[in-house]
Amino acid sequence: MLQAKESNINATFLLNDFNMSPAYEKLIEECLNAGVKIDCIGLQSHPNLMT
């Protein structure tokens, strides 16, 4: 992350995952607690539209 910001100060850090379990929430919290600036959080999903 630090190298990305050094290369491009306008870089956006997007944390994106399909896993919406408590483990994803824990990962986000650990990043924030470590001082990682998260610009955007993505949540992937594949809804079943054939109902």
Image (spheres, rainbow, N blue to C red):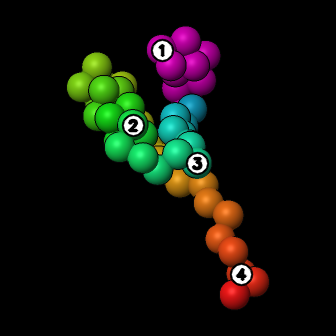
Asked if the magenta segment contains residue 7, the reply would be yes
Residue at the outermost left position: 33
Residue in the foreground of this view, choosing between 33 and 26? 26
Q: Determine whether the residue tagged by mark 4 lies in a helix, strand or loop.
A: loop
First in sequence: mark 2 vs mark 3: 3
Residue 50, horizontal then vertical, whole percent: 75, 83
Residue at the outermost front position: 51
Instruction: Residue type at mark 1: give it.
Output: Leu
Residue 32, horizontal then vertical, whole percent: 29, 30
Q: Is residue 7 above or below residue 50?
A: above
First in sequence: mark 1 vs mark 2: 1
Q: Is residue 41 left or right of residue 35?
A: right
Q: Which residue is mark 2?
A: 23
Circle number at residue 2: 1
Q: Which residue is mark 4?
A: 49
Q: CA distance from mark 2 to mark 3?
A: 11 Å
Residue neighbourhood size for the residue with mark 3, other residues' Cα within 10 Å, grouped as few (<14), some (14–19), many (≥20): few
Q: Determine whether the residue tagged by mark 2 lies in a helix, strand or loop.
A: helix
Asked if the magenta segment contains residue 39, the reply would be no
Q: Is residue 2 left or right of residue 25?
A: right
Q: Which residues are magenta?
A: 1-10
The reply to whether residue 43 is in sight is: yes
Residue at horizontal 53 percent and vertical 54 percent from the top: 43
